[in-house]
């Protein structure tokens, strides 16, 4: 069994991940046993993810993890997850991880990295102090979109023709072509640069409608998509579904409703997008109007 | 043929791999210990691993310190903590083909 601890701190780079097994895992799980409940009026988590340290994402496995959800977040000794809003038994768990000789030092990220993380932890405390908990919800409230496509990953994820030959653009437009569609190609105006402006213009040529002020709200007709860019490397699309949540299909891989932190996506602007750091715009897909290739 | 699973919109990059590099991979494979656990799961976006395909049916894939070799319908995984095979495959790509990948 492995206890996986992700230091949720970066935006573009991959977050450092600590994996504990055996005695170290057992010790850490004892420190993470739920203590006092976090009540109303206590300090919560920011309503939108922020840049810099955002806590530790902890994924316990096995019988020893009884009482803990499959994934939860810890910050300053507070633990939040499904059915979990408690202080950790060791409220200085972050000091244990980042301290001298602690598990973080074994990742060999440089002698100054643990101190850097500690300073980020302190800065995050100041951010958290602004957010007082109200009623605790498992998932953020979202508004369903009457015209949005349904979330049906099984249809796309056939480990065959549909999955391998349709990409994020196909999925975002809810339009299977089996050609790994490229923005603008159907209109003879394929993008020539991997920038927001170039890919957006190409999508407009395919009859997607640029809606920069959509602000994550369901359109009256059609469905909402979002364009993001990995600068000079790639583009990616998300789509807002009938249930109001966002989903995506990274290339030939499976459709998913999770971001790079494993969190359900309520807003692609604030989701963990890995290297796709540039949020370009929202666009509207009018069913039956667009053509992609 | 080698390649990397890295993009979402653009097709993933693929390139020819030479016999010398393939021999290095095979030699390293022979020295790796067996791995029977859960392979690491890559995130949805960004780098998700690399692969080498050798006709008539041998295939290698590598991500996060685990290398899997498939041949004649059978699959075997080994632990490559230093990610030697993964780094060797990625280093064999032509200059400029891959974006910066942080392992």
Image (cartoon, coloured by chain):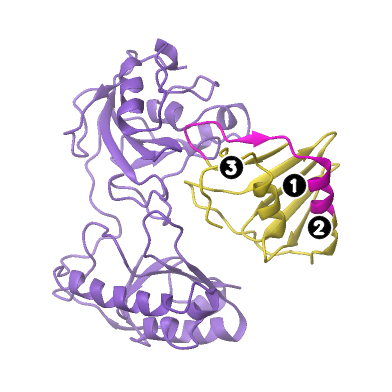
Task: Please provide the residue range marked out in magenta.
Answer: B7-26
Position of residue A289 relative to residue A261, above or below, is: above
| Disc 1 from disc 3: Cα separation | 13 Å
Q: Is residue A217 shown left or right of residue A59? A: left
Q: Colour of chain A?
A: purple
Provide the residue designation for mark 2.
B29
Is B15 within the magenta? yes
Residue nearest the observer in this picture, B87 or A130: B87
Q: Secondary structure at mark 3?
A: loop
Kindly identify which numbered label has been placed on residue B60.
Answer: 1
Q: Disc 3, disc 2: CB below 8 Å?
A: no
Q: Are marks 3 and 2 on the same chain?
A: yes
Q: Secondary structure at mark 2?
A: helix
* Between discs 3 and 2, the one toward the N terminus: 3
Q: Is residue B59 shown left or right of residue A163? A: right
Q: x, y (%) of residue A103?
A: 50, 81
**Does the image show residue B77?**
yes
| Disc 1 from disc 2: Cα separation | 10 Å
Q: Residue at x 28, y 60 (%)?
A: A51
Disc 3: CA contacts within 10 A as few (<14), some (14-19) or many (>=20): many
Q: Colour of chain B?
A: yellow
Residue nearest the observer in this picture, B87 or A147: B87
Provide the residue designation for mark 3.
B5
Disc 2: CA contacts within 10 A as few (<14), some (14-19) or many (>=20): many
Residue A161, image quadrant: top right
Residue nearest the observer in this picture, A250 or B52: B52
Q: Is residue A126 shown left or right of residue B37? A: left
Q: Disc 1, disc 2: CB below 8 Å?
A: yes
Position of residue A208 relative to residue B24, above or below, is: above
């Amino acid at each position: 069994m492995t206890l996986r601890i992700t230091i949720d701190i970066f935006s573009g780079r991959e977050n450092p991940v600590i994996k504990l097994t055996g005695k170290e895992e057992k010790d850490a799980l004892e420190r993470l046993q739920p203590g006092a409940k976090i009540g109303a009026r206590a300090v919560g988590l920011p309503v939108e993810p922020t840049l810099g340290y955002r806590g530790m994402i902890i994924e316990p496995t096995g019988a020893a993890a009884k009482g803990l959800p499959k994934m939860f977040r810890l910050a300053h000794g507070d633990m939040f997850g499904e059915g979990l809003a408690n202080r950790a038994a060791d409220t200085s768990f972050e000091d244990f991880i980042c301290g001298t000789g602690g598990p973080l030092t074994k990742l060999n990220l440089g002698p100054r990295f643990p101190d850097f993380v500690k300073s980020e932890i302190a800065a995050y405390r100041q951010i958290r102090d602004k957010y007082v908990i109200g009623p605790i919800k498992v998932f953020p409230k979202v508004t369903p979109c009457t015209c949005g496509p349904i979330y049906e990953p099984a249809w796309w994820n056939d480990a065959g023709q549909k999955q391998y030959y349709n990409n994020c653009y196909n999925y975002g437009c809810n339009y299977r072509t089996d050609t790994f569609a490229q923005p603008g190609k159907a209109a003879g105006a394929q993008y020539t640069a991997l920038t927001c402006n170039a890919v957006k213009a190409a999508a407009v040529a395919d009859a997607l409608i640029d809606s920069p002020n959509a602000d994550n709200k369901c359109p009256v007709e059609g469905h909402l998509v979002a364009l993001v860019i990995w600068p000079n490397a790639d583009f990616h699309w998300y789509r807002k579904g009938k249930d109001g949540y966002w989903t995506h299909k990274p290339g030939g891989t499976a459709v998913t409703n999770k971001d790079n932190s494993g969190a359900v996506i309520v807003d692609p602007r604030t989701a963990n997008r890995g290297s796709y750091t540039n949020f370009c715009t929202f666009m509207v897909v009018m069913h039956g109007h667009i053509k992609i290739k | 043929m080698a390649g990397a699973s890295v993009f979402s919109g653009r097709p993933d990059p693929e390139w020819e791999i030479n016999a010398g590099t393939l021999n290095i991979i095979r030699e390293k494979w022979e020295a790796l210990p067996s791995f029977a656990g859960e392979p690491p799961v890559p995130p949805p976006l960004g780098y998700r691993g690399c692969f080498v395909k050798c006709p008539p049916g041998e295939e290698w894939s590598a991500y996060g310190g685990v290398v899997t070799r498939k041949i004649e319908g059978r699959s075997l995984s080994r632990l490559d903590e230093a990610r030697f095979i993964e780094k060797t495959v990625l280093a064999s790509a032509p200059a400029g083909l891959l974006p910066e990948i942080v392992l």
